[in-house]
Image (cartoon, grey):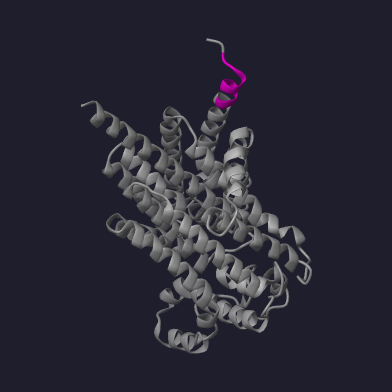
Amino acid sequence: MRLTLRDRRDLASKYLLYGLFVLLPFTVAFGHRGVAPWLLLASVPAFLRGDFWQTAYGELFDKAGAANPYFAAFAAALGFCAWVLISGIWSPEHHYALFLYVLAPLLVGGSVIWFALHLTPLWKHRLATAFALSVACGMAVLAFEGVTDGFLRSVLPPDEGPRGGARDIIELGRGVTALAPALFPASIIVATLFTRMAGLAVLALGVVAAVTNDVTANAIAIAAGFSVAVIAFRAPRATLRGLQVTALALLVATPFVAAALPVDEIFAAVSSSAPPALLEGVASWLHRLAVWRSVATEALGALPFGRGADFARAWKETAPMIDVPGATVPLSLMPTHPHNLFLQVWLELGLPGVLALAAAIYWGGNCLLGAERHVAVGAGLCGAIAAIVVSMMVEGSLWQVWRMAAMALAGMGVALSYSITEERAKLTRGRRTHR
């Protein structure tokens, strides 16, 4: 049978995605920043389809208004990006293009999610399997690197000596960060297509990768995601609503809580009572406390409009050095970013940025609450969101595109898990009808 142009296009799209899923484990293990261009390539099949533009954006603007939560969430996100652009006027470096760091992952992420929801039943099954295996293999490679102290990275050029090895371990930890939210929908896909034990095995790979790659935040994020996912199996809608409320509460309260942190007292108490081995292990967290208080104080003093996009990076150049218990050298009171996305929004974008982000969280949460889904899909979704919120609170940065791409990758996984569960439900209903 002769293939039409559309058939060839669809076939090329599927093979492109297959190739990308093969590359994903190597991307997170050897260059986590590559997740962003990976996602851009994955969006090509959707952007080349006319029905994508008709359904994804045509219907969105056909029903423009606050009554449509999808439009309201999209409008809030666009408003947030617009304010990032405007804030470049008074930003120290006048980085006007930073709004693209948020807008691009938003649009590209939306396209891969749409594509995952509009596949034929056969390709939904195939691409869901490829996605889950890719995430599992990625975590397996990262776990292997963690157990062997980065063996694969050490045998590949360039050889940068001891400092390069330390850098490699940090990079591997960020690879786990990039893959952690997608771990939960991948586990649900494996459990749906194979067995529950297989799904738990995928989660176990993520735990090993997080624990062995020396980034405590990853272990906390995966633990939080797993705990929330378990709760979501019992009360899916209430759990999702709880996550929405928690994210909004954290966004609003974080600067006020952080500004009141008794950092000096904590430093003194820890220095006098904690053993040296423990001090070394918690030094980075103690440093975060000092950074958070400093950023929160500056952010509240910068209201209502904030200091402008990317102010934190410019502030780093003049920030004082402080002695942190357990640290072998003085550390800057302002690293490249505040290690808290919500604080960064308050600091750089002020009240307009906070309100726009709050609106996006609120309406985006309402979109998810209004969608019907299988309980397992909801559990995977809640686990991914919980992992993302933890990452936002303890290490996230607004201007690292790969972090935004990691969220979109998780969204693609949730969409694929939704697609295969819906197809299975249709088959089950069909069998019952024919009996």
Tell me, yes or no, if residue 356 can be seen here.
Answer: yes
Q: Position of residue 176 (x, y in %)?
A: 48, 53
Look at the image and give the residue range highlighted in magenta. 3-10
Q: Looking at the image, is 193 positioned above or below residue 336?
A: above
Q: Main secondary structure of the magenta part?
A: helix
Q: Position of residue 171 (x, y in %)?
A: 55, 54
Question: Which residue is more in the foreground, 52 or 62?
Answer: 62
Q: Is residue 280 left or right of residue 429?
A: right
Q: Looking at the image, is 151 positioned above or below residue 79?
A: above
Q: Looking at the image, is 4 positioned above or below residue 318?
A: above
Q: Residue furthest top?
A: 1
* Residue found 51% across the figure and 60% down from its top: 363
Q: Is residue 99 left or right of residue 260?
A: right
Q: Is residue 181 left or right of residue 73?
A: left
Residue 4 within the segment the image draws in magenta: yes
Q: Position of residue 250 (x, y in %)?
A: 48, 72
Residue 360 within the segment the image draws in magenta: no
Question: Which residue is more in the foreground, 337 or 210?
Answer: 337
Q: Position of residue 293 (x, y in %)?
A: 56, 81
Q: Is residue 90 left or right of residue 335?
A: right
Tell me, yes or no, if residue 340 can be seen here.
Answer: no
Where's the C terminus, which quadrant? top left
